[in-house]
Amino acid sequence: MNPRVAGGIVLAVVLVATLQKHALGAEQMNNLLIFRASVWHLLSSVNLYALSTDHADLFKYSPTFALCMLPLAALPLLWSALVWNMLNSIVFIVGIYSVSHLLYRSDNDSSDDDNRNRTIAVLLWICAVELLTSVQNFQSNALMAGLALCTLSAMERGKTVPVALYLALSFHIKIYGAAPLVLMLFYPQKIRFTLAFLGFAAVLTAAPLCAVSSDNLLWQYQNWKVLLESDHAASYGLSAMSLLSPLLPNVQAVSFVQAFSLLVLCAPVAVIAIRPRLSTLPLRLLCGASVLIWMVIFNHKAESPTFIIALAGVSVWYALLRQREVENSHAEKIVLLMPRRGYKWLWNGLLWFVIVGTSLSVTDFFPESLRSGIFASLHLKVLPCIAIWLYIQMQLWHQIITSNFATGTQFER
């Protein structure tokens, strides 16, 4: 339960897993090979989004992401793997720390320090298996999750420019990484944020111009657009759409489900934003947890390593349940109307449903016959996250309907 020990163990496991993958051969690091090859394809004016003989899959990120891989491509493969996985893991752990510190802000109360440290450790252990899954596949999802958590923390602290930078970076890794944009409805300085975000986005979009011509860069963005359009119709992924696949005959139906889910996601955010007295820290973070889980469960290309993002959202949700009372900057207690003690079994049950169903169901904790036969057919990986996301919507609307007397708490200035 010591956060430093927990974080150290997690990083040690990431280190060992990376060394193991390298020892098994380069074919075990296909995603990293794709990232390393992308920068040379960009510099050589080769179509980034065509199937290459250098690796066994397609590159699906932005040209800016390809350019950012130059330092990794210049390193030996082992060092490249270590740097990439450690970057992902450290950013994620920093995100967990920063969000946990929002809930326990007292500098003098030792009990708050103990609670904060225990919460950080619990959240790290909740996410440990999914973090390992992500780094074993050399994915960018832990980096995405960490940036999203840092975005939530920076929003609450009124750091508009860092928020804009985090979101612009996330957008240029994967487009849906900009989903936390909707949470800016809660906060002031919207014009400053909009200008900063557009500025960072423009700079990052144009960054490859330092290495390629404008015509070539435009061509690469056109190729990316074609790939994304074809990708949308290719599969349902490990998403809510995979559960509804018998009812979704075409890509338009998939888009309808995603659009409807977006309305469900944004509705409580909009109501809370236009009723400032409801805008408490717990409700804002609960909306953040909803966004993080939504980014995965309604992503038509979600796969097992993507779920570290959803588990980050689950962690924020669980941290709020652990911390029934939080302090604002004026040391006033704001009570979060969560389920009564008699319902504690429900949210603990949902958490264990996620740990077993989402994290452990795809590991060797269960035999292959269960994993490929029963769990795959039940879509067990995504089902617990859908259950928690729906429960969060119930919690949000419960607060909106019953908390007419609530007084909103301002973010730290």
Image (tube, rainbow, N blue to C red):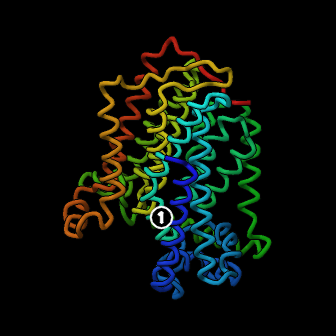
Residue at numbered disc 1: 134
Amino acid at dot 1: Ser
Residue 23: x and y in percent read: 49, 84
Lateral position of residue 353 relative to residue 16, left or right: left
Q: Residue at x 37, y 53 (%)?
A: 254
Lateral position of residue 111 relative to residue 290, left or right: right
Q: Residue at x 76, y 43 (%)?
A: 195
Q: How many marks?
A: 1
Lateral position of residue 366 relative to residue 278, left or right: left
Single out the residue that lies furthest toward the front. Answer: 110
As helix, strand or loop, the secondary structure at mark 1 comes to helix
Residue 134: x and y in percent read: 47, 64
Asked whether the viewer can see residue 220, the reply is: yes
Does 57 sit above or below residue 373?
below
Q: Residue at x 59, y 20 (%)?
A: 408
Does 279 sit above or below residue 143?
above
Residue 114: x and y in percent read: 55, 36
Name the foreground residue: 99 vs 400: 99
Does 184 sit above or below residue 141?
above
Single out the residue that lies furthest toward the bottom. Answer: 53
Asked whether the viewer can see residue 175, the reply is: no
Q: Residue at x 41, y 41 (%)?
A: 260
Name the image quarter holding the C terminus.
top right
Residue 281: x and y in percent read: 57, 28
